[in-house]
Amino acid sequence: MKQIACFLTCGYTEAGAMQAFLRKINPRYDFRQWLPNKTRKRRGSSKSISSNISGLTGSALLTKVCDIVTAHREEISECAVIICK
């Protein structure tokens, strides 16, 4: 099953519902949520959405995505696609 890396806008709705929505649209892919990290614990990352990333959009979101992709390059390279919303 191909993996898709998902970087969402860091709101609580996205943290809880977007992954299920994406699976419903296309169950042939494994949608891996990287941001916000509430639903998928990363080593060194808090399980809750911190206030400094909650609601990130635009260039702030892209900066955070670039930081994560750089830090987790090997794992993300296994994904077929990266989605930023």
Image (cartoon, rainbow, N blue to C red):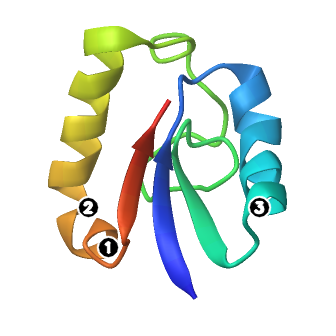
Which mark identifies residue 75? 1
Snapshot quadrant of residue 5: bottom left
Determine the residue positioned at 78% across, 25% down: 13
In this rendered view, identify the residue nearer to me: 35 or 4: 4
User: Do the residues bearing badges 2 and 1 touch, measured as CB atoms within 8 Å?
Assistant: yes
Q: Secondary structure at mark 1?
A: helix
Which mark identifies residue 72? 2
Determine the residue positioned at 66% across, 41% down: 38
Determine the residue positioned at 61% across, 63% down: 31
Give the tally of numbered discs: 3
Q: Is residue 61 above or below residue 29?
A: above
Neighbourhood count class around disc 1 (C-alpha, 10 Å): few under 14, some 14–19, many 20 upward: few
User: Do the residues bearing badges 2 and 3 touch, measured as CB atoms within 8 Å?
Assistant: no
Please give left or right for residue 8 compared with residue 23 in the image: left
- The disc labelled 3 sits on which kind of residue? Arg
Q: Say which residue label 3 marks.
A: 23
